[in-house]
Image: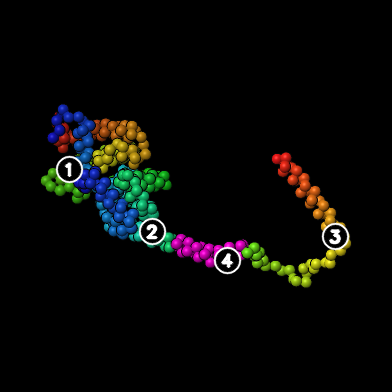
Amino acid sequence: MDESSPALWAEEIAGCASGIAKGDPSALERLFDRAAPRLLRYGLTLVRRREDAEDAVQAALVRLTRSPQTLDAVQFPWAYLLRMVRNEALRILARRRPVMALWDDLTGRTTGPNAIELAERDAEVQAALRRLPADQAEVVILKIWEGMTFQEIATVTGESLNTVASRYRYALTKLQSTLRRVAIEVGYVVE
Amino acid sequence: MWSSEQSDLEMTEALVRDAAWLPQPTTVFRNRVLTTVAQQQKQARWWERCQYAASLVIAASLLWFLPGMMQTLQEGRPTAVVTTERPDSVPTVKPWTLIDDYEWGLVQAALAKQSHSAGLIHGLL
């Protein structure tokens, strides 16, 4: 898991964007190596199929190379990049009938003595997120995993601030009821 | 450890945050993306070169033809026209006759009258 703070992360992406705009051939590779996992995760939230998420990320990056100055010119390059992936994901969804498939498995992700317990917790959380409507799941992921503000999320999704905040609230309420048992088991909450 | 005093929503947020995961892109996917992007960049560069070459050709054509055209216009020379007409089919000038004199007089009189009327109108304005 990438531990970069949102500010550092934004700075890093801005650096890659600047390199791409200047025609630095390694800048796109750097961007891919740093951002692809997070872009894939976001894509998966929307399309829910690994191949489709990869297609969305690829299409977004190809589109980016056609107008390399764009990413450097925008105020929030990371939000813009996510929005590009979102647009591509929506195009893919429009072309194909959405199929509910498994997200990536968590094999080998956790290590240590309580690895199995943590893997089970993560699997439960993933399953709970998968059960949410895609528009609510995406807000949760952007807010909690990407550390974005509601304003930034509104920029990515093209929705109003109120809509984004409501979706987040609805999603958390649903997750709360779904994950209560897990929270008790893992020790997040005392009965 | 979360106590019951803390809000359930915060607990849920923490649970989701700790369960964050990242799908790792495969090498095949990485290579595919970077190859596609490289191809696109190559095509874009080729297209840019074509546009540049076309611009050069247009600019050179203008520089080559424009001075000559301007000179022709300044000299009042008509531009060369390709025709299929043969010299013997071109009408020749006939000698001036008395009838022509008479008609020429009529034309002059009409022009003088028109000029006088125009002068009057101009004066009124």
Q: How was this image coloured? A: rainbow
Q: Which residue is mark 4?
A: B68
Q: Which mark is residue B101?
A: 3
Q: Nearer the viewer, mark 1 or mark 2?
A: 2
| Label 1 – label 4 distance at C-alpha | 84 Å
Label 3 sits on a secondary structure element that is: helix
| Label 4 – label 3 distance at C-alpha | 43 Å
Question: Which residue is at the far left?
Answer: A113
Q: Is residue B69 left or right of residue A125?
A: right
Q: Which residues are magenta?
A: B50-74
Q: Nearer the viewer, mark 4 or mark 3?
A: 3
Q: Nearer the viewer, mark 3 or mark 2?
A: 3
Q: Which residue is mark 2?
A: B40
In reply to whether residue A164 is colored magenta, the answer given is no
Q: Which residue is mark 1?
A: A118
Number of dots carrying numbers: 4
| Label 3 – label 2 distance at C-alpha | 80 Å
Mark 1 neighbour density, 10 Å: few (under 14) some (14–19) many (20 or more): some
Whether residue A77 is visible: yes
| Label 3 – label 1 distance at C-alpha | 119 Å
The image shows residue A53 at horizontal and vertical percentages of 33, 48
